[in-house]
Amino acid sequence: MKFIGAAIVLVMSIGVNIYGQIPFSQEQFRTFDGKGNAATFPDLVKAAGQADVIFLGELHDDPVGHAIEAELFRQIFNEYSAKRTVKLSLEMFESDVQIILDEYLDGLISEQHFLSSSRPWGNYKTDYRPLIEFAKEKRIEVFAANAPRRYVNMVSRGGRETLRALSKKAKKWLPPLPFGEPSEAYSKKFKALMAAMPEAQMGIDKILSSQSLWDASMAYSVSRALKHGRDPLVIHLNGGFHTENRLGTVEHLLKYRSKARVIVITMRAEKDFLSFERSKHADLGDYVILTDAKLPRSKR
């Protein structure tokens, strides 16, 4: 009973909106530019007007970050959709379920069938459903941007050359092959991250290639989204590592569309979210948002 009572108090103190997502509150985060200067949420909305693509680099289990994403998506749409075609691109859905996502957005299938067929992440209902429902309401095009995980796994086990064996139909769910190599800076950063996992070291180059397929797939999806509409403005969500320091997915996008105007917003959860530490946070993005790490994490 004590546990139940504590849970009730926690829910009441945090609150949820109609989607089960915690409400947007500017008391739960601080916004900075990439050098640590104070910025505001309206600064992000204004900056979006000068961009073709907004990369939102999230922590997947950060409830504050998800509330920020939903609010920024709404505000950007409300501010710019009269003159520009606003689109949404998501790491959280794989390209081979695009038709299912489209059918749901068009009202052809029920949400139950959409979820049973599209392999949504475990935290979909609380963290990504608000974005999809807003897109459905406003008839916003949404791109399932990730490579099918079975093909990412193929590359991690056998290397990038294994994709040659796929059928032409399967290759349509991937970026043009061969997909681009990672930059030296990204490779160094990735291998440093993986150094804490000794079991990965034997196949580190193949794992890096699978990560690059992930990055290239999302970048290619964004590049396709930029091809149609009135001065398209694409908002893309991905895990922060994919776009931190304007590496990874950003680099691949600029190979596909060299003139794309890109803004990277990187979110990090910190217990002391009021303080920007240059050694930890500088240049993680054009903007860096520090969120309150003391709140309960999303369940994935």
Image (cartoon, rainbow, N blue to C red):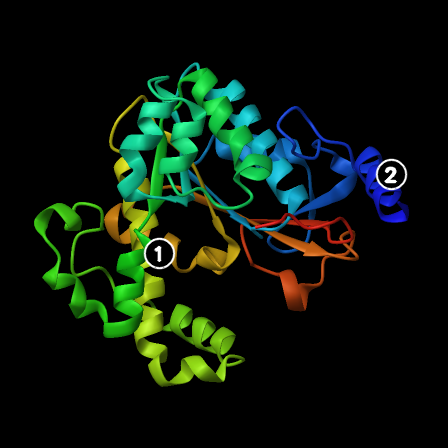
At x 47% / y 21%, what residue is drawn? 80
Rendered view: 159 above or below 14: below
Q: Is residue 179 visible?
A: yes
Task: Identify residue type, mark 1.
Answer: Asp
* Distance CA(mark 2)–CA(mark 1): 41 Å
In the image, 2: left or right of 26?
right
Q: For mark 2, does the 10 Å Cα neighbourhood hold few (<14), some (14 to 19), or many (20 or more) residues?
A: few
Q: Is residue 81 visible?
A: no
Residue located farthest toward the right when viewing the structure as drawn: 2
How many numbered dots are placed on residues in this image? 2
As helix, strand or loop, the secondary structure at mark 2 comes to: helix
Of 143 and 98, the residue lying toward us:
98
Rendered view: 258 above or below 81: below
Q: Nearer the viewer, mark 2 or mark 1?
A: 2
Which image quarter: residue 96? top left
Q: Quadrant of the N terminus?
A: top right
As helix, strand or loop, the secondary structure at mark 1 comes to: helix
Residue located farthest toward the front when viewing the structure as drawn: 1
Q: How far from the left and from the top, in percent, is residue 230? A: 32, 21
Of 51 and 171, the residue lying toward us:
171
Q: For mark 1, does the 10 Å Cα neighbourhood hold few (<14), some (14 to 19), or many (20 or more) residues?
A: many
Rendered view: 281 above or below 184: above
Q: How far from the left and from the top, in percent, is residue 71? A: 60, 30
Residue named by callout 2: 9
Task: Identify residue type, mark 2.
Answer: Val
In the image, 249: left or right of 292?
left
Q: How far from the left and from the top, in percent, is residue 298? A: 64, 47
At x 35% / y 71%, what residue is drawn? 208
At x 16% / y 61%, what residue is drawn? 178
Residue named by callout 1: 215
